[in-house]
Image: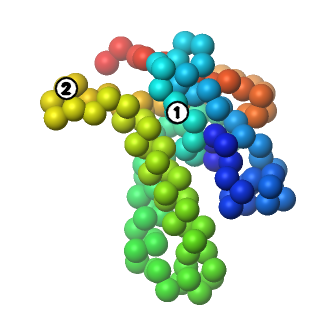
């Protein structure tokens, strides 16, 4: 989880977890595009937020919640799943930073941060940059 980690997240330090806020300047930091891209989920154990695999994860979580609602509720995980879906949906809305009825005028960020960073996530400033299409 990236951004200002909410207290409901098991990763949050507020809940006895191990994470503090990270990549709060994604999109707005040096070399950024002037759009707040804090939030979202990291791709793996690195510092990237890759939005294609992130979309697959969100879709699978959505499908499982719709398919096995009773199991989520019985396990006490319904609220956690719904909050995570809200978290990632809100992040995706930020990533679609230029909306238009003209399809070619739309803009969506497909990757945030860099995979070459070799430090803990918390002190990083992270960015999202424009890339040639």
Residue placed at 41% from the left, 30% from the top? 109
Question: In this orientation, does residue 43 appear?
Answer: no
For marks 1 and 2 on the same chain, the one whose residue lies earlier in the sequence: 1
Task: Report the side of 65 relative to 23 (left or right).
Answer: left
In the image shown, does 5 or 44 lie closer to the viewer?
Answer: 5
Q: Nearer the viewer, mark 1 or mark 2?
A: 1
Q: Which residue is mark 2?
A: 104
Mark 1–mark 2 distance (CA, rounded to whole Å): 21 Å
| Residue 121 placement (x, y as % from top left) | 73, 34
Q: Quadrant of residue 105?
A: top left
Towards the viewer: 100 or 11: 100
Secondary structure under tag 1 reads loop
Quadrant housing the C terminus? top left
The answer to which quarter of the image holds residue 126 is top right
Q: Which residue corresponds to the image point at 58% horizontal and 28% vertical from the top-left?
A: 26
Residue 110's x, y, as percent?
42, 32
- Camera-side residue: 58 or 38? 38
Is 44 placed above or below 84 here?
above
Circle 2 packing at 10 Å, graded few (<14), some (14-19), many (20+), is few
Q: Which mark is residue 37?
A: 1
Residue 40 appears in the figure: yes
């Amino acid at each position: 989880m990236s951004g200002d980690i909410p207290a409901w997240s098991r990763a949050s330090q507020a809940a006895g977890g191990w994470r503090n806020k990270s990549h709060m300047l994604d999109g707005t930091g040096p070399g950024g595009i002037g759009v707040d891209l804090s939030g979202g989920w990291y791709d793996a154990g690195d510092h990237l937020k890759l939005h294609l695999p992130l979309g697959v994860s969100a879709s699978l979580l959505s499908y499982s919640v719709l398919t096995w609602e009773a199991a989520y509720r019985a396990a006490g995980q319904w609220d956690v799943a719904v909050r995570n879906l809200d978290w990632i949906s809100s992040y995706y809305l930020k990533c679609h930073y230029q909306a238009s009825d003209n399809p070619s005028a739309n803009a969506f960020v497909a990757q945030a941060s860099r995979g070459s960073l070799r430090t803990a996530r918390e002190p990083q400033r992270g960015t999202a940059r424009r890339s040639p299409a």
